[in-house]
Image (tube, helix red, strand yellow):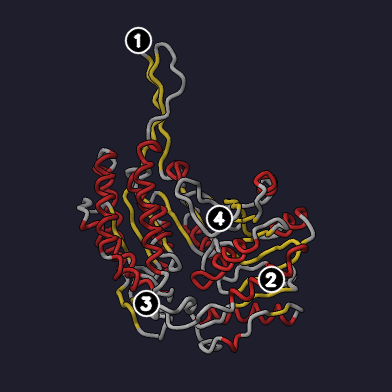
Amino acid sequence: MSGSLRTISPIDGRVVAERPYAAEGEIAGVIAAARTASVGWCQTPIAERAARLTAFVDAFLADGDAIAREITLQMGRPIAHSPGELRGFEERARAMIALAPEALEDVRPEAKAGFTRFVRREPLGVVLTVAPWNYPLLTAVNSIVPALMAGNTVVLRHSSQTPLCAERFAAAFAAAGLPEGVFQALHCDHGATERLIAADGIDFVAFTGSVGAGRAVQRAASERFIGLGLELGGKDPAYVRADADLEHAVAELVDGAFFNAGQSCCGIERIYVADEIADAFIEAYAEAVRGYVLGDPLDPATTLGPLVRADAADFVRKQTAEAIAAGARALVDPDAFPREQAGTPYLAPQVLVDVDHTMRVMTEESFGPVVGIQRVPDDEEAIARMNDSDFGLTASVWTPDEAAALAIGARVETGTFFMNRCDYLDPALAWTGVKDSGRGCTLSRIGYEVLTRPKSFHLRRA
C-alpha cells in the first residue's frame, strides 16, 4: 500500500495532519508484535493491568486541553463542547477498569462432591478497534479499555479524519509503561483495513461506523471464524407523552438532537408528541433551536459547529428540501444564521413539522442538525411509529409515569430505552443495538463477555 492520509479541517479547509499509510510489511509487523505481546499480557495479573490502564487514563487527561482543541480542529465540534468528551472518556475508562475483576472472575456452579468445576473467561488474542471521527475518544475507549483489561492486545485503526486521536492513545499508553506490542495504532486506508480483517492474526473486530461500512467489515471477515462487534448508527426516536414535563423534555431533546451538530449515532432524529401538548411543545422547541449560534467552533461563543464535510451538510440539505417539497414545514429560518451557506459544512439547524414516514428525513439517518416532529394520538401510534425503522439503537419516552414507560419500552425495538433522558451511555449498562444498528455489545459486565471466550474446567478427584 502507498499513499497517505490528509486530514482537512471543516472549520476553514486547513490541513490538520498528513501521515503516510502503513506499508503492508509494517501492518504484518504490527500483527506479529501484538500476537507476541499477547502471550505475556494475558498472564499479567488483573491488578497490574488495572494499574497500567489507570496510569494511561491519567496520562491521557494530563494533555486534555490540547486533545480537546485537536478534536475541534479535526472534526469541527465547538471548543466549548470538546472537553466534555474527555470527561466521558474518563468516566467510561475508569468504570470499565473497576468492573473488570468482577466481570472476569471464574463462574462457579453449585458445588458437586468429588469435583472442581468452573468456567474461566480467557482473552481472545488480538482485538482490532476501528473507530470513527464523530466521537473519536468515546467510541474507541468502549472497546480498547475492556479488551486490554481482559488480557487481549489491541490494534487501533482510527478514522483518517481524526488520526491525532490514535496517536494520543499510543502516547498515553507509552507513558503508562504498557509493554511493547500490547497497544499499537495504525494509519491505513479502507482497502488495507479490509485486508487486515481478512488476514490471520486478528481475533476480534470492534467497529463503529455506517451501515455500508459495517457490511464491508462483515464481508471482509466472512471467511474467518472471528467475532465482530458492529455499532452502525441509528434513527433514534423520542415520544413525548401528554403528561411530560414540557420544559425538561424540550431542553433535553433539543440538546439530544443538535449536540455535535447532530452527528451522533444515538442522537435524536425524530420526535413523536401527543396531540394534547403538541402546539406548546413545538413552539418551545423551535424557539430553543433558534437560539443556537452557528460559527467558528474555535470561538467559545459558538454552540453549533460545521458538519465534518460539505457533502455531509449537502446531504442533510437535500433531505430537508425533499421533505418541504412533500408538504413539511420548516420552523427555523436559515437566513437567521449568516454562516449558513450551500456547498459548505456550515448548516443551520432545522425543525420540521407536518412530516410523515414517506419522507426520508423520518426514515433515513440524517447525521446532521435536523429533526422532524410528528403528532400522535396515543401510545399505540407512538410505538408503531418508533418501530417503523430499519434502526434500533436507542429510544426514549418522556413521562413521569414509570409503569407506562416500562410498558412502552417492552414493546419498542431498541438496544437502549430511556425515560426522561437521551443520548447518553451508562458504563454500567450494555451498549447494543438491533436491526441495522448492528450487533454485539460494549460496556457493562456483558461487554466483557464478547471480548473473552469461556473455557470450562471439569476436574474429577480420584
Nearer the camera: disc 2 or disc 1: 2
Using the rendered image of the protein, determine whether residue 116 is visible from the camera's viewpoint: yes
Nearer the camera: disc 1 or disc 4: 4
Per the image, the residue denoted by label 2 is 282
Query: Which numbered disc, 1 or 4, marks the residue that appears first in the sequence?
Result: 4
> Relative to 386, is 334 above or below?
below
Query: Which numbered disc, 3 or 4, marks the residue that appears first in the sequence?
Result: 3
> Relative to 19, is 203 above or below?
above
Instruction: Say what secondary structure mark 2 lies in.
Output: helix
Contact, mark 4 vs mark 2 (Cβ under 8 Å): no
Per the image, the residue denoted by label 1 is 462
Q: Percent x, y for residue 192? A: 39, 66
Query: Which numbered disc, 2 or 1, marks the residue that appears first in the sequence?
Result: 2
Name which residue lies at 44% across and 54% down. Answer: 206
Name which residue lies at 52% across and 61% down. Answer: 214
> Relative to 236, is 301 above or below?
below
Q: Is residue 180 left or right of residue 356?
A: left
Q: Percent x, y for residue 252? A: 57, 63
Nearer the camera: disc 2 or disc 3: 2
Q: Nearer the viewer, residue 154 or 102?
A: 102
For marks 3 and 1, give the CA distance.
67 Å
Q: Which mark identifies residue 438? A: 4
Nearer the camera: disc 4 or disc 2: 2
Q: Percent x, y for residue 389? A: 67, 60
Using the rendered image of the protein, determine whether residue 200 is visible from the camera's viewpoint: no
For marks 4 and 2, give the CA distance.
32 Å
Q: Nearer the viewer, residue 54 or 326?
A: 54
Name which residue lies at 53% across and 81% down. Answer: 311
| Three-letter code for the amino acid on which mark 4 is drawn | Gly
Query: Which numbered disc, 2 or 3, marks the residue that appears first in the sequence?
Result: 3
| Three-letter code for the amino acid on which mark 3 is drawn | Leu
The quarter of the picture where the N terminus appears is bottom left
